[in-house]
Image: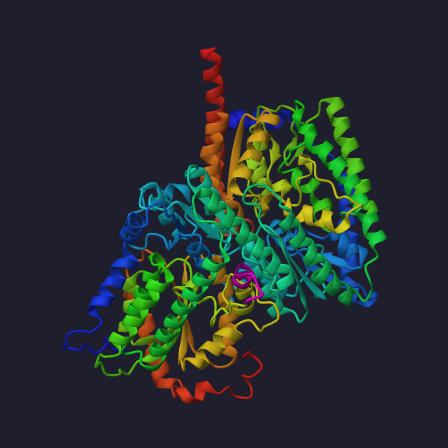
Amino acid sequence: MSTTTTAAAATTATPSLKDASQARQKRMIADHFTDLSTAKEQGKKVVYTFVPGNLTELISALGMLPVLPEINALQSGMRKKSGGYIAEAEKAGHSEDVCTYVKCDIGMKRSGNIGPTGLPLPDPDLLLLSYTGCFTFLKWFELLKQEYNCPIAMLHVPYQPDGVVTPAMRQYVVDQLENKVIPLMEEVAGRKLDMDVLAEHLGRSAQAEDDLCAVWESAKHRPSPIDGYFGGVYYIGPIFTSFRGGEDCVAYYRELRAEVEERIALGMGPQTPIGQLDDQKYRLVVEGPPNWTNFNDFWTMFAQEGAVIVSSSYTRVGGLYDLGFRHDPSDPLGTLADYCLGCYTNLGLPSRIDLLEKYIKDYEADGFFINSVKSCNSFSAGQLLILRELEERTGVPGGFVESDLVDPRYFSKSNIDNRVQSYLQMLEAKRQGGFVAA
Amino acid sequence: MGEAMAVDTKPDPAAEVLERARTLALDLNLTEVKRWKAENPGCLAIGHMPIYSPRPLLEALGCLPVGVFGGGDEIDIIRGDSYFQSYICHIPRSTVELGIAGHLDCLDGMVFPSICDVIRNLGGMWKLLFPDRYSAYLDLPQNFDRDIGGRFYAHELRRIASEITALGGLALDPERLRVAIEDDNRRRRAIAQLDAARFATPWLYPASEAYLVVRAGSVLMAAEHADLVDSYVALAGQRSNRPLDNVRVVLVGAFCEQPPMGLIISLERAGCDIVADDFQHGARTIVGDVVLHDDEDPLDTLAFCFLDQGIATASRYIADDEKGGALIAQVRETGADGVIFAAASFCDPALLDQPMLEAACAAVGIPFTAFKYSENTGQFQVIREQAGAFSDSVKLWGDTSHASLTQPSPTEQGVAR
């Protein structure tokens, strides 16, 4: 695409302004990592766990602090440290073929385990292996068990091959929570779980989930006040990680929702790396995780051409709230089971395609785009079939690029930029052709 | 470097049974399955992917269970490649190719057990690519308590049984299931006998032959497979091959995508007696007989045996045991001199497991080497040289007195379980 167009789009953007919600999230993260750095002195127990199917309310109700190695890895990617960490792990015998989140995490641990705020991370007292939608999780924590001398609580979450949660699947998860996971967590925490406290946390989760859904829905407006992928990964930060169920999390989403509603009223687009994107030429749905090592470059490739992402599957890996799920304080263990079972990557491929089709239609997208990451077979295996199926079902063109999560060797900027530009040119040509034909 | 196996100039007493095994094991057109269906009109053939599927259940439903291991190096991948990115392993491509090209048309359904994310997603793709054919995902439990994982898994088995019955299979009958479990016990005993023979006299039972004999069971009912294995063990035992100056190795990591036959033979020619392997892991997943009880539903028995008698592999969560402990024990039991880690490229379970297993080996001084392959790898020279160098180094500098490896030293005892 011509540089003139690029420059024109860039000049229509207004400078980025930090919203109050952003400032709040920044403070929440800083406080959390400060807490973690002094956890041992404070006598607080630390639980390492994963984003999909996370049991944050359970961890916090027992007074423990969560650490999410996936988040550490992506933060390392954004801070340009992941390449060195991955090299460290590969030197120690880890294959170049496997998940780079795992290698980044192991390399970071062997390099001193310094967290994203520059403070040291404590060793875990418990590895909470919520095995949800990703086989690698299982191996990841087996590997971490070699690094740390602590117990593992295993929660096997059955997969939804047909998009249905059966009573047997739900019961299996509840049985494990009740008889395996919670007793071990209580042992590590040194106290019994108070179900009333857990219910309070779950109730607050539901409040935040309501507000997050309103934020997702806002992208149905034109112009969209949010970017539902690149911007969306910031919006999911608190609720997918360490804060769901807390007061701060409720306040964050209330604030975020108000800001988004204000942007709708003012006809404002989302903030992007090149400023505010009001002039939105293309509305896209994105499948697959982002690349973190060149996150802003990748976002800019779309923003500078006036493309806004109205919805994405990656922002649903920690919960499909927009399909109606809410944590239910009246059934604490059942609702945790439902939550784990319902995460995006726990859905069979046909269900994933149905969902993406729904997003394309509901958000009136002009196209969809797949970022296929080498590291993540859970996402990536089958994406070429997803591409075909979605094009056939919706008549909307799809784009496809390959990159990686946090391995900088797999982000070929010029190639990806070319692909993105070619794809958007194709959308434009289709649009023009349609206009002429009409 | 070690040399090729000793050649017996007399006629090979096992030649005929071996040729039958080769035909059954490597026939991508599934001629035997078609023959079986013609002989058993109305009966179903149900395919299943590696690693483990409960074949006795399928037999009890009147079905022929058919192990599907991809296309190996015998099929050109044309359309299969268009469904997968370059960084995904090879077996799903060749399996899709087999499906699209009609090689699997004689199968009435496919079962995709929970091995890894790729095979899991392949199950979803199968539903879309072949919407008129039955396909099921089998979630093997990662919780090994009978009351929790056992209950869930038994439910999974009942679900699949009812779906296959609806498809035209027989209704689940406890007596038929008991017979099928007993047949499978017989088959397992036959394979155990073969493995023991390999361990004792590997020069009579090379791994490349054992591979074919075990894999032939992919298209046979258990009782018939047991006969074939028994026959091979008896006939190959009559050979007069002499022992060679080879090293004894355990091969690990090839449990799903299979290496080409040429690769296995190359390892043997490089001076390695493969005395144990995980090529056909499903045939050995359950250790020992599955004991039936009068007061227990045989379907529960079948479910519980996976919990209680299932052996360690990369796709099975190791809860309380030491990681790598099972491998160390296997090395000791088979008197192996070392380990070859052979994983398919981009195989998450094998490659994520490998550093832990290597560490376990290193901790007790077991030598190992590692390489990757693809099912259609065509160049074996590099691997042969690597295996030859490994074999030579073990012979020159390793402690190859097998007795010394059968007893753990005091420092090793913490690792073995």
Q: From the viewer's perspective, tell me whether residue B33 is left or right of residue A33.
A: left
Residue B359 picture location, percent across and down: 52, 73
Q: Vertically, is B406 above or below A176?
A: below
Viewer-nearest residue: A5 or A157: A157
Q: Which residues are magenta?
A: B294-303
Looking at the rendering, which quadrant does residue B7 occupy?
A: bottom left
Secondary structure mostly seen in magenta is helix
Residue A93 visible within the image: no
Q: Residue A302 is drawn in which quadrant? A: top right
Q: Nearer the viewer, residue B144 or A54?
A: B144
> Is A169 covered by the magenta stretch?
no
Q: Is residue A114 above or below residue A411?
A: below
When the figure is inspected, residue B338 is found, relative to residue B78, above or below; the finding is below
Residue at point 76% right, 56% down?
A59
Quarter location, residue A104: bottom right
What colouring does the structure picture have?
rainbow
Image point (32%, 61%), residue name:
B216
- Using the image as rendered, state which of residue B366 and residue B47 is in the foreground: B47
Q: Is residue B296 magenta?
A: yes
Q: Position of residue B276 (x, y in %)?
A: 39, 73
Task: State the residue in front, B160 or A79.
Answer: B160
| Side of B320 relative to A401 (left or right) | right
Q: Is residue A277 visible?
A: yes
